[in-house]
Amino acid sequence: MSNTSQSRHSMHLTLLVWRQEGPHKPGSLEKFTAKNVSEDMSFLEMLDFVNEDIIKSGKRPIEFDSDCREGICGCCGVVINGQPHGPDRATATCQLHMRTFKDGDTIVIEPLRAKAFPIIKDLVVDRGALDRVMSAGGFVSVKTGPHADANAILIPKPIADLAMDAAACIGCGACVAACPNASAALFTSAKISQLALLPQGKPEAARRVTGMVEQMDKEGFGNCTNIGECRAACPKEVSIDFIAKMKREYFKAMFAPMESAAGDGGA
């Protein structure tokens, strides 16, 4: 391959990366130069590539989070040029490729910013608040023993499909970072709806929605005012219709009998 051909497929970029030693230390944007970046690299591969040069120079590498690198776990979430996960719709940071950018671009890379997501180091934030919301009720209690046949409980396909759409949420926190109110309503509503839509989730529906909504408020997330930025930032394009579903479930729980709210009756 000629040098001319190679130059068309590689880029030199300026990175402004948020650097912060710890949760109680001040932070600021630090400038790095990314040279000979292939347009076929993923965004995280580009950061790995830059970190190699940083380490060779004797400096501390950029801290960022990742795990699956397949758009499944959501750990990779960062804010790129002001947009959680970057400019491509329905794309997690780990699936974003450098061909989205141009040679000579300046890219600003920041952590997901929200009161409920304290910064651990650089681009890594503590998203444990989302786990605690899930722990407050995002489960179905079942008795152990032989499983019923899959066809024993008939579920209409539109309902099953809708539940799967809600379950597509990977809990990355992009919705929180995109929302001007730092609301976790899209995440929480998706986790509530994926169970509330199915027969298996109905016996504990009242306890689930009250527990998760109350925990969401305790964690310091803001209120939803239907701005819609959460939907635009979501890498799985989870619908904001689930927020309306969550509100309906919550109002139903408020008027449910006490025994139902305790998980002993239907909702």
Image (tube, grey):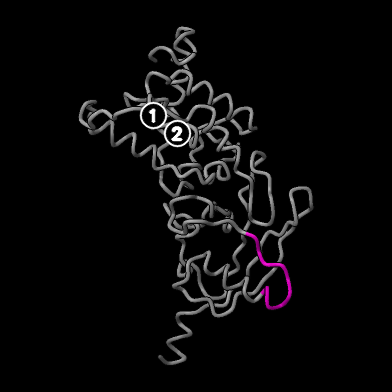
Q: Position of residue 209 (x, y in %)?
A: 48, 23
Q: Examine the rendered structure and indicate whether residue 236 appears above or below residue 103.
A: above
Amino acid beneath label 1: Leu
Query: In what element is the residue under mark 2?
Result: helix
- Along the viewing direction, whichever of 46 and 208 lies nearer the viewer: 208
- Along the viewing direction, whichever of 163 and 106 lies nearer the viewer: 163
- Along the viewing direction, whichever of 158 and 106 lies nearer the viewer: 158
**Point 46% across, 61% down: residue:** 96
In magenta segment, residue 208: no
Residue 200 occupies quadrant: top left
Residue 158 occupies quadrant: top left
**Point 24% across, 25% down: residue:** 153
Q: How far apart in space, not on screen, are marks 1 and 2 (Cα)?
A: 7 Å
**Point 50% across, 50% down: residue:** 74
Amino acid beneath label 2: Lys
Q: Residue furthest front?
A: 145
Residue matched to label 1: 195
In magenta segment, residue 62: yes
Residue matched to label 2: 191
What is the span of residues highlighted in magenta in the rendered image? 54-63
- In the image, taking residue 146 as reference, residue 55 lies left or right, namely right
